Image (cartoon, grey):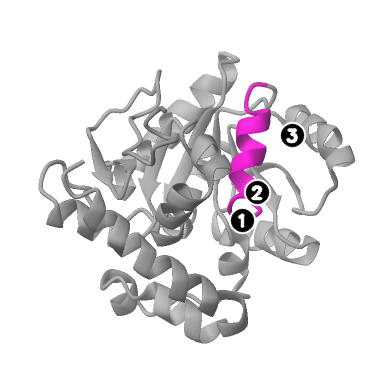
Amino acid sequence: MNDLAAGNPMPWPDGARAEAPVAQVGGIAVSTLSLKALIDKMLREAPLRRSLDQPAWLVFDCNGQGLSMNASDSAFRTDLAQADLIHADGQVVVAASRWLGGSEIADRSSTTDMFIDSLKPAAALGVTYYLLGGAEAVNAECARRITALAPGLQLAGRRNGFWSAQDEDAVIDAINAAAPDVLWVGTGKPREQAFCVRNRHRIKAGWIVTCGGLFNYVTGDYPRAPMWMQKSGLEWLHRMVTRPRQLAWRYLTTNPHALWLIWKHRHG
């Protein structure tokens, strides 16, 4: 039985070109790069990889839900292991790296912050984005808002997140016709990771970044927590209270499991 099948800590993926050490948190190797360093890396490397026609870099996130799914869902665990970089989307992941000793994660790199904070630098550098996911109205409104927020931002294209297996080739063809530097995939775990892994070698993009409900946060359909809750690791509580029907069961089950996994793998 290999490490993954046994549920042991996941090694850093073969061929990954990390510029910082990783922290082992709850069985997942998470990059210690800061939010700013991660954005700088993306804006520097994604256009170069696309222009050289190199395979897209897969960038996945890690939070409490991801820790729980990695331990309980073998298909998700296999897909997550294909990432070139996994960043700390949850504050609990950052805090755990400091509790456990060893390499510490610099700060939380929530996907929403990673996206929003990168918009104006991307516009200045001519880095192109493609938005894949969300309902059509949400996707379109997100595109409108970010181009207003960052004048000059180049949107290579966009598409909603609803398609059948029979339509997947057409989705890939549309992305490849646009050939974005960064493809943002927001269809939710585990679908977005499976899509990225399944299609990484035929998608023409520099970086492929999974982003969950990002587009809904940009449009305001999903409210973000106050900053004090974000910094104290309580954004999950705000999300659960504001969207109880969708998220209460998820957080009440995955959060305790994630904490147990962090304890279980504390010497890993």
Give me the residue at 62% from left, 27% from top: 200
Circle 1: element type: loop
The residue that disc 3 covers is 175
The answer to whether residue 80 shows anywhere in this view is yes
Q: Position of residue 180 (x, y in %)?
A: 64, 33
Q: For label 2, count other residues whose C-alpha is less than 10 Å away and answer few (under 14), some (14-19) or many (20+).
A: some
Residue 191 numbered mark, or none: 2
Answer left or right for 9 relative to 21.
Answer: right
Task: Give residue 90's quadrant in the image.
Answer: bottom left
Q: Position of residue 190 (x, y in %)?
A: 60, 50
Which comes before the other along the chain, label 3 or label 1?
3
Instruction: Measure the C-alpha gap from mark 3 to mark 1.
Output: 19 Å
Task: Give residue 108's quadrant in the image.
Answer: bottom left
Q: Position of residue 253 (x, y in %)?
A: 46, 71
The answer to whether residue 91 shows anywhere in this view is no
Is 55 rendered above or below residue 99?
A: above
Residue 188 numbered mark, or none: 1
In the rendered structure, which segment of residues is drawn in magenta?
185-201
Which comes before the other along the chain, label 2 or label 3?
3
Circles 2 and 1: CB atoms closer than 8 Å:
yes
Q: For label 3, count other residues whose C-alpha is less than 10 Å away and answer few (under 14), some (14-19) or many (20+).
A: many
Q: Nearer the viewer, residue 213 or 118?
A: 213
Circle 2: element type: helix
Instruction: Measure the C-alpha gap from mark 2 to mark 1.
Output: 6 Å
Instruction: Measure the C-alpha gap from mark 2 to mark 3.
Output: 18 Å
Q: Position of residue 134 (x, y in %)?
A: 70, 59
* Amino acid on which disc 1 is placed: Gly
Q: Nearer the viewer, residue 79 or 35?
A: 79
Q: Residue furthest right?
A: 166
